[in-house]
Image (cartoon, helix red, strand yellow):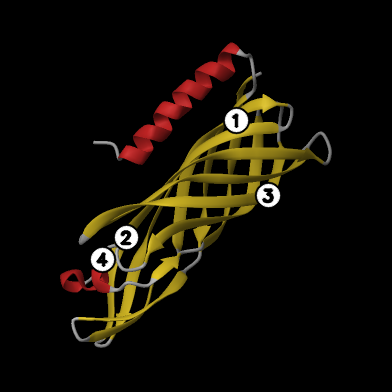
Amino acid sequence: MMNSPFRTLLLTAVVVCATATNAQRTIRLNAFGGWTFQDKFDISGTYGGYAYNNAGIGDGAHYGGGLEFEVRENKCVELFYQNQSAQGFIDYGLGQFTTDVSVNYAMLGGLGYAPFSDAVHGYGGFNIGAAWFNTDYGNSTKFAWGGKLGLKINASEKVGIKLGAQLLSPVQGAGGGIYFGTGGAGAGVSTYSTMYQFGFTGGLCFTLGQ
């Protein structure tokens, strides 16, 4: 069964796509991959007699896809999904606990282009949406925001190459935000924290209609 955030993203994409098609606007399909760097955040606190210091998500490759719907020249609404498989960790009194984590984002936002020439366009955007984390010890969904900057290089009228940098941030209480730990140990930490996942990304952009 589809995750609820992805289901919502898909439904929104269908509605916006239908609107854009009726308005004869440009629609672009993006397929991308890249690398997200490790992020560590403070969860200082005590639970079950053990002191907890840091938690985080390790670095790893990410991939995804999305759609852009032009609302006016060089201004688009963007929807995208991204997945990263990495290792999550919690530092506590007896050492470090680790587990595999699947990090998923479903995001919606605005994207603007700045033409430098016919072949090269700069772009930048801001997104909000949902992040959800799947582990052997539980699942969690959180509000997320993000931003991106980069270049789109047109190889032809219908195909482009996109290169850029991005920041995605799930806003979550450290104790229960990314739920993994031995015996639910992480759930007792009350500190509130925000993750910042920075990465580089690249991929292909296909113009479907205009």
Element type at mark 4: loop
Mark 1 vs mark 4, CA separation in Å: 39 Å
Instruction: Please report the residue visible at 64 percent of the width from the left and 49 percent of the height from the top.
Output: 163
Which label is found at residue 206? 1
Q: Position of residue 13 (x, y in %)?
A: 47, 28
Left or right, 17 with respect to 173, comes to right
* Placement of the C terminus among the 4 image quadrants: top right
Does the residue at mark 1 contact the one at mark 4 (Cβ under 8 Å)? Answer: no
Instruction: Please report the residue visible at 71 percent of the width from the left and 35 percent of the height from the top.
Output: 155
Instruction: Please report the residue visible at 34 percent of the width from the left and 67 percent of the height from the top.
Output: 88
Mark 1 vs mark 3, CA separation in Å: 16 Å
Which label is found at residue 150? 3
Q: Earlier in the sequence, mark 2 or mark 3?
A: 2
Which residue is disc 2 drawn over?
Answer: 101
Front residue of 175/196: it is 175
Quarter holding residue 5: top left
Q: Earlier in the sequence, mark 3 or mark 4?
A: 3
For discs 1 and 3, the disc positioned in front in the rendered view: 3
Q: Earlier in the sequence, mark 1 or mark 2?
A: 2
Does the residue at mark 4 contact the one at mark 2 (Cβ under 8 Å)? Answer: yes
* Placement of the N terminus among the 4 image quadrants: top left
For discs 4 and 2, the disc positioned in front in the rendered view: 4
Element type at mark 1: strand
Q: Earlier in the sequence, mark 1 or mark 4?
A: 4
Left or right, 40 with respect to 87, comes to right
What is the crowding at mark 2: few (fewer than 14 residues within 10 Å), some, or many (at least 20)? many
For discs 3 and 4, the disc positioned in front in the rendered view: 4
Mark 1 vs mark 2, CA separation in Å: 31 Å
